[in-house]
Amino acid sequence: MGNTSPKLNGVEATFWHVDDIDWTPVQKQRNADGTVAVVREKWPIMRPDFLSAYVHYDPGMVVRRHGHRSNHLVFVLDGGAWIGGDWCTAGTHIHVPLGATFGPIVAGPHG
C-alpha cells in the first residue's frame, strides 16, 4: 500500500509563545461613561491561507455581527462574553464555518 504518513518533506511544526508577540489594537470604542474599550490582537501566524489570532476584549467592548473568509475557531480562555446572545465563559469552544456570520460580541465585566 505504500507510505500512508501525511508527512511532507520540509514541513515542520512552528512554536510561538504569546508573551513574545506584541499586541496590535484593532478596534476602539468610547463608552457612555467616557472610558475607551479596545480589542487587541496578537497574530502568531498570518498567511493568505491561515490566520491564528490571540484576542483580548476590554470589558464592555462590543463588536458587531460579522463574518470571516475562513473557518473560524474561538476558544474563550478567561473572562466571558455574550456572543450572538449566548453567555460564553472560559472553556467555551465555538466553530464558525466559512460563510457563517458571528456575533455580536459583547465582552463581560472582566473582558
Image (cartoon, rainbow, N blue to C red):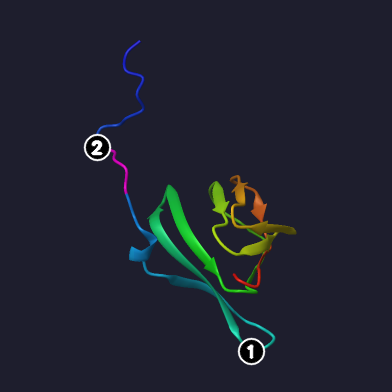
Report the front residue among 46 and 44: 44
Q: Is 105 a magenta residue?
A: no
Horizontally, residue 82 falls left or right of residue 27, namely: right
Could you say which disc has been placed on residue 10 in the image?
2
Q: Residue at x 29, y 40 (%)?
A: 12
Picture residue at 64% right of the left edge, 58% below the top:
89
Q: CA distance from mark 1 to mark 2?
A: 52 Å
Residue 32's place in the image compared with 93, above or below, is below
Label 2 Cα neighbours within 10 Å, binned few <14 / some 14-19 / many ≥20: few
- Work out whether residue 99 or residue 19 is closer to the camera in this orientation and state it: 19
Residue 40 in the image: state x and y as whole percent: 49, 70
Q: The residue tagged with tag 1: helix, strand or loop?
A: loop
Q: Earlier in the sequence, mark 1 or mark 2?
A: 2
The segment highlighted magenta reads: 10-14
* Type of the residue with mark 1: Gly
Give the residue pinned by disc 1.
34
- Report whether 7 appears left or right of 81: left
- Residue 30, position as x, y percentages in the image: 62, 83
Instruction: Tell me the quarter of the picture where residue 35 sits.
Output: bottom right
Identified by mark 2, the residue type is: Gly
Of residues 36 and 46, the one drawn nearer to the viewer in this rendering: 36
* Residue 75, placed above or below residue 18: above
* Dot 1 alpha-carbon crowd within 10 angstroms: few under 14, some 14 to 19, many 20 or more: few
Q: Residue at x 47, y 66 (%)?
A: 41
